[in-house]
Image: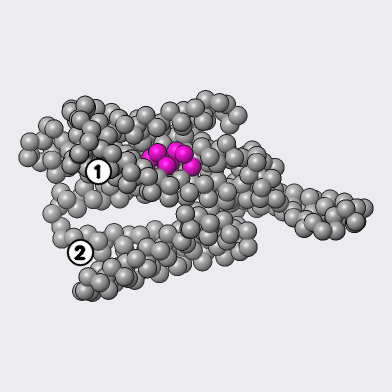
Amino acid sequence: MSKAGFNLSCSVRIPQRLRVTGSLFIIMLVFIITAVLVKVPLEPLPFFSVTMVKIIIINSFGAVLQGSLFGMAGLLPASYTTPIMSGQGLAGTFAAASMICAIASGSELQDAAFGYFIVACVVVFLSILSYVLLPKLTFFQFYQERNRKQRSDEQNAVTLMNAENKDAAEDEKQQSISMMKIFKKIWILASSVCFTFTVTIGTFPAITADTRSTLADGGTWERYFVPVSCFLLFNLSDWTGRSLTAVCMWPGKDSPVLPAAILARVVFVPLFMLCNVQPRLHLPVFFHHDGFFIAFMLIFAFSNGYLASLCMCYGPKNVLPHEAETAGAIMAFFLALGLATGAAVSFLFRALV
């Protein structure tokens, strides 16, 4: 919750270039330190303290980076928001696949962790290079210049109005972009993306990761059931849903079907609760077969990726071009708010099982 507010505050006060490059450099530095510390033996208390500090730093600057990227994508056509959403899904798929490979290879946990963080450092470094090269593209320069011109025209209009109505506007602060004015245009989409992630994170992985196979009977499938059926299938389906918005964007941004479909996803909460989640104290197991859980997971993850990506694509397009960057940052704030709210309610959902 606090990182979401930190992100929105930074998006208004700090230049975009500094937000993106600064966040990436700090995240890469934390990953480098983490990779080094993997090889350094630490006592439990110092290890816990260092880990918590790193989590706070990565989450805070990750939120700033995410908000900045969505704001920047808001300046471009709607389809350019899709790669950001799709990339997040791809990252989750890579992490799930890496976990399965580590289990299959029987490699030491320390070696696997070191490899994870080295790869992360390389990816972040490539991201920095890509961002440095981005302003050199003619395509990006065109939309950036159009945004500057729109801002300049509005500021000139406001200045002219102030000159004509000095007394009336004397006690008011004129701003080129009103945060509240923009929010009023996109509040349905912002609330929708927030609710989407509240349902998703409230259920996955708090409930889904505790689901046990009824078919494994102590065999190999028991070791792989959660990594494959829960994490890999979720991330693959989520990635597919996010990527689909590059070629299909239905329902439309003003259609009541979109918020209705998002509200309907709440049905997945009781469906997963009634699967073979263990241990359980209150509810009976209704869906015993592994196939039910897998089917629910595929639809649950696909709908999360597709509907959330639609909301994030539509948000900046519901406002004027020069307001798109701020709209993108607001949408990213509500996405982060949904993640935080989902994490909070996940404890309640798990306790009800």
Instruction: Look at label 1 and name its amino acid.
Output: Ala
Please name the residue shown 48% across and 58% down the image. Answer: 2
- Seen as rendered, the residue at the extreme left is 218
Please name the residue shown 34% across and 65% down the image. Answer: 52
Magenta-highlighted stretch: main secondary structure?
helix
Q: What's drawn in magenta, residue-wise?
A: 194-201
Left-right relation of 195 to 94? right
Measured from the top left, where is residue 93 in percent x and y?
32, 45
Q: How many neighbours does mark 2 have within 10 angstroms: few (below 14), some (14-19), or many (20 or more)?
A: few
Measured from the top left, where is residue 182 in percent x and y?
66, 45
Please name the residue shown 7% across and 40% down the image. Answer: 218
The front one of 216 and 235 is 216
Q: Quadrant of the image for the C terminus?
A: top left
Question: How many callouts does the rendering have?
Answer: 2
Q: Which residue is mark 2?
A: 110
Of the image marks 1 and 2, the number of the one nearer the N terminus = 2
Measure the alpha-carbon separation of dots 1 and 2. Answer: 23 Å
- Which of the numbered marks, if any, corresponds to residue 209? 1
Does 3 sit above or below residue 258? below
Label 2 residue SS: helix
Label 1 residue SS: helix
Q: Inspect the magenta stretch and tell me whether residue 200 lies in it.
A: yes
Whether residue 205 is visible here, answered yes or no, is: no
